[in-house]
């Protein structure tokens, strides 16, 4: 049976890098997987591509998609921006392989209510200090946004026990974290 996997973790935990490694492991195993592309109203960052990193849309369009019931889940994040998973894409790709959602804790709760059998994995940073270093090291956020992201991160870390599995992403060990996650998925 193909699985719906939810990967969460605070901004700066290194989720993006771990998920990239995880996709490589799927490929090495000739295993089929789709990484869901979310819609968001936040600004595009340097290096990001519309339709690859996210579907970057205007708030008006996002609100109309909420009305139409197009989202499997959505959330207004700590920064005030909206993020959501498009239901149709997820259901279509589940026919041919596993589907990974990289979403926040609010989205996770919604999916667990709406979809039976979804598997939740939380990626944690080694420490809050390390998380702050990583967030600042990115150099892509304003000071105000960094503060909001840190606040959200702290509350996410306090709630991590609602996930079935917690994987710590140690510095420079994203391959190991991804291997651990792949094993968890295949053993479930
Ligand atoms: P970022 O702005 O750093 O790309 O993402 C901020 C947060 O939004 C991260 O915790 C990320 O996992 C979460 N996020 C990304 N896409 C979605 C989504 O479709 N739904 C929800 N609920 N959260 C999302």
Image: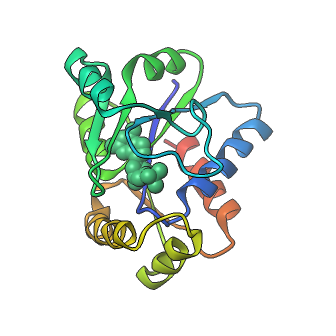
Question: Which colour assignment does the render follow?
Answer: rainbow
At x 26% / y 51%, what residue is drawn?
80
Q: Please, is residue 57 above or below residue 166 in the view?
A: above
Whether 10 is drawn above or below 129: the answer is above
Relative image position of residue 122 (x, y in whole percent): 42, 57
Count how many numbered circles sit on residues in the image: 0
Report if residue 121 is visible in the image. no
Position of residue 127 measured from the top left corner of the image (x, y, whole percent): 45, 81
Residue 168 position, x and y percent, is 51, 69
Residue at 56 percent across and 70 percent down: it is 139
3 over 166 or under it: above or below = above
10 or 162: which is nearer to us?
A: 10
The residue at the point 35 percent across, 50 percent down is 104
As drawn, the residue found furthest toward the right would be 28
Which quadrant of the structure image shows residue 10? bottom left
Q: Position of residue 21 (x, y in %)?
A: 69, 51
Location of residue 115 (image quadrant): top left
Query: Is residue 68 visible in this depiction of the protein?
Result: yes
Q: Which one is in front, 54 or 121?
A: 54
Foreground pick, 102 / 145: 145
Q: Residue at x 50, y 71 (%)?
A: 135
């Amino acid at each position: 049976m193909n699985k719906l996997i939810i990967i969460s973790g605070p901004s700066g935990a290194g989720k993006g890098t771990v998920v990239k490694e995880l996709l490589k492991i799927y490929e090495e195993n000739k295993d089929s997987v789709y990484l869901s592309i979310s819609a968001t109203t936040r600004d595009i960052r340097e290096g990001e591509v519309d339709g690859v990193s996210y579907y970057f849309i205007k708030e008006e369009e996002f609100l109309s998609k909420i009305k139409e019931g197009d989202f499997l889940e959505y959330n207004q994040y700590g920064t005030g921006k909206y993020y959501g998973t498009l239901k149709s894409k997820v259901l279509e790709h589940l026919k041919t392989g596993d589907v990974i959602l990289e979403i926040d804790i609010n989205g996770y709760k919604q999916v667990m209510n709406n979809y039976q059998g979804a598997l939740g994995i939380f990626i944690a940073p080694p420490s809050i200090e390390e998380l702050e270093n990583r967030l600042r090291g990115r150099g892509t956020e304003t000071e105000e946004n960094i503060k909001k992201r840190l606040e959200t991160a702290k509350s996410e870390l306090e709630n991590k026990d609602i996930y079935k599995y917690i994987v710590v992403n140690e510095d420079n060990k994203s391959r190991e974290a991804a291997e651990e996650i792949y094993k968890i998925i295949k053993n479930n």
